[in-house]
């Protein structure tokens, strides 16, 4: 005999306590709390990195509200959840082990974001492990919502800045105002503007996406409408931010730069964003689905048929509580292996991180070294173990060489990171154009490297740059990360280096690319040899 349970608005305190006791929830709640505390303690550095980002970045300050909102969403479903008989699930242990391995990959690749997602996913999986898949499914969206606590999206800043600049400049030109553009800096007859990180609209996008997910879940019942509204919450703030930038530029231009150039710039932005979100929610409200549907909706949203409760067994011998304790212990043991293995590998690499002093080629056929650099510029790569720069000159003119070395990469001191770049937003130097150039490596292979033209408003440089990892050259950041991960998984040295060559293009050189190509062919074998010696190879 089975009993069909209908959704109800909630249970009273006494009813909830009776239902909890009847279904055997208390031991599972205790087990879940212990497992969650164990995960947070074991991966405390990763968990703290999430909270620290909430506290130090306005873009991610909403993270403080994610957990309370998730708990509130679960509490709203207490009538349905209290009728479920919690039953620990052994399959979740395999998921825990996989997430522990993902955390290890994130640690070895020094991608903190991967580690953060892995830890939050562990917390979500703990509900599955302790309470069973049916319970995890019934809490599906509230648990998914926890993923929004991870400070995600900073890598979107450059493309968002580019889109904002493109949109604003296009609209200004359509308004009949002449514009001169160099990269992310553009000049109108009344003054100059630049698109900096704060103009990217990332904080608007993340706030809109978070609110959009919550609004779609609470307002709609069909997955199609939910998906469409979430997509709108992504597209609308991106387009609106370009329009916001245009309006601010035009306000500044029409007021002869008296308005929208200071703090009122930010105020206009948030007011405009608030109006955009109100309009988005207002339009979305025309298709709201507040009323709960029939049994079909109940099943779709996590409803079920409940059979009379009976003691769960493991192979007919072990009671449910013993099974749960065993699975929690096994999951905890598998997770504990992850940070211990990472610590073991890092200790071995730290001991092996020795070598000769980093040096640059002193003598090159047809080139002479200069005591003073011909330009004051270096790539913006942080926390290098060693860095060397040298200017060379031949009859065609000067060429600059920069080599930066990371002997033992760690979080915050790594070759590939968001905070590293040829130039950084808001700095004295900024990008003008980008392209590609093929060079020949010492082993005969060719490598396509990025060519970035930069300027400080007075001088222009063409910069070629690429990477050296474990004896291999690559110009791809993705490949560089993959090579680093491979070396660390095999407990070998993860030493890596940036190689940048640059030439002035504001002296009327006929073909600075040919000059750099000649320098590459002469200098690269010696650079490779010196890097190998510097890492003890």
Image (cartoon, rainbow, N blue to C red):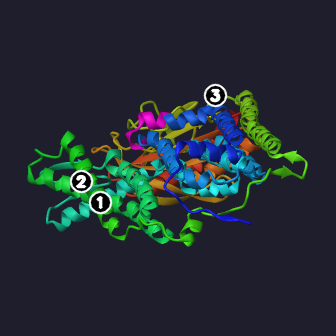
Which of pointers 1 and 3 indicates the residue nearer the eye? 1
According to the picture, the residue beneath numbered tag 2 turns out to be: 272
Which residue is nearer to you in this view: 378 or 489? 489
Quadrant hosting residue 27: top right
Q: Residue at x 8, y 50 (%)?
A: 255
Residue designated by label 1: 240
Q: Which residue is mark 3?
A: 357
Q: Is residue 53 magenta?
A: yes
Mark 2 or 3, which is nearer the eye?
Answer: 2
Mark whose residue sits in front, 1 or 2:
2
Which mark sits nearer the N-terminus, 2 or 3?
2
Q: Is residue 385 above or below residue 280?
A: above
Which type of secondary structure does the marked residue at label 1 adopt?
A: helix
In this view, the residue in front, 86 or 253, is 86
Rendered view: 267 above or below 219:
above
Whether label 1 touches label 2, CB < 8 Å:
yes
Q: Is residue 500 left or right of residue 409?
A: left
Q: Quadrant of residue 133?
A: bottom right
> Tag 3, which secondary structure?
loop
**Magenta residues?**
52-60
Q: Earlier in the sequence, mark 1 or mark 2?
A: 1
In this rendering, is residue 421 above or below 286? Answer: above
Please provide percent x and percent y for residue 287. 37, 70
Q: Looking at the magenta stretch, what is its main secondary structure?
A: helix
Quadrant location of the C terminus?
Answer: top right
Q: Does the rendering let one see residue 27? A: yes
């Amino acid at each position: 005999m089975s009993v069909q349970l209908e959704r109800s608005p909630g249970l009273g305190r006494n009813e909830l306590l009776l239902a909890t006791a009847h279904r055997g929830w208390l031991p599972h709640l205790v087990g879940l709390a212990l497992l969650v505390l164990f995960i947070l303690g074991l991966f405390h550095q990763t968990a703290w990195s999430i909270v620290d980002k909430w506290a130090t970045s306005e873009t991610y300050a909403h993270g403080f509200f994610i957990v309370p909102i998730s708990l509130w969403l679960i509490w709203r479903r207490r009538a349905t959840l209290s009728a479920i008989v919690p039953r620990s699930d052994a399959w979740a242990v395999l998921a825990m082990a996989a997430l522990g391995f993902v955390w290890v990959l994130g640690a070895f690749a020094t991608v903190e974001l991967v580690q953060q997602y892995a830890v939050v996913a562990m917390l979500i999986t703990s509900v599955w492990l302790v309470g069973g898949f049916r319970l995890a499914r019934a809490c599906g969206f509230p648990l998914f919502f926890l993923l929004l606590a991870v400070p995600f999206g900073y890598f979107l800043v450059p493309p968002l800045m580019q889109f904002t600049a493109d949109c604003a400049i296009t609209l200004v030109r359509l308004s009949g105002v002449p514009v001169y553009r160099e990269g992310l800096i553009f000049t109108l007859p009344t003054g100059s503007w630049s698109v900096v990180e704060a103009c990217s609209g990332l904080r608007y996008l993340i706030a809109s996406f978070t609110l959009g997910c919550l609004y779609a879940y609470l307002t709609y019942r069909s997955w199609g409408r939910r998906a469409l509204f979430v997509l709108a919450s992504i597209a609308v703030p991106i387009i609106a931010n370009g329009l916001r930038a245009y309006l601010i530029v035009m306000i500044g231009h029409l007021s002869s730069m008296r308005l929208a150039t200071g703090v009122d710039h930010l105020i206009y932005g948030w007011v405009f964003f608030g109006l955009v979100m109100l309009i988005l929610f207002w339009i979305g409200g025309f298709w709201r689905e507040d009323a709960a549907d029939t049994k079909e909706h109940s099943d779709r949203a996590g409803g079920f048929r409940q059979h009379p409760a009976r003691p769960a067994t493991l192979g007919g011998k072990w009671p449910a509580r013993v099974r749960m304790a065993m699975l929690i212990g096994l999951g905890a043991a598998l997770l504990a292996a992850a940070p211990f293995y990472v610590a073991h590998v890092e200790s071995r690499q730290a001991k092996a991180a020795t070598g000769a002093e980093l040096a640059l080629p002193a003598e090159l056929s047809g080139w002479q070294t200069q005591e003073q650099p011909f330009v004051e510029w270096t790539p913006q790569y942080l926390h290098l173990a060693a860095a060397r720069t040298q200017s060379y000159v031949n009859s065609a003119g000067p060429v600059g060489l920069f080599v930066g070395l990371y002997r033992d990469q760690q979080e915050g001191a790594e070759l590939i990171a968001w905070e590293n770049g040829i130039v950084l937003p808001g700095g004295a130097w900024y990008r003008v154009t980008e392209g590609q150039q093929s060079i020949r490596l010492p082993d005969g292979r060719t490598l396509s490297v990025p060519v970035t033209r930069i300027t400080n408003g007075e001088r222009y440089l063409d910069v070629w740059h690429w990477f050296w990892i474990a004896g291999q050259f690559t110009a791809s950041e993705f490949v560089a990360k993959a090579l680093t991960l491979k070396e660390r998984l095999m407990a070998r040295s993860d030493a890596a280096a940036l190689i940048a060559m640059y030439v002035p293009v504001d002296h009327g050189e006929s073909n600075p690319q040919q000059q750099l190509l000649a320098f590459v062919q002469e200098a690269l074998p010696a650079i490779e040899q010196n890097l190998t010696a510097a890492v003890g190879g």
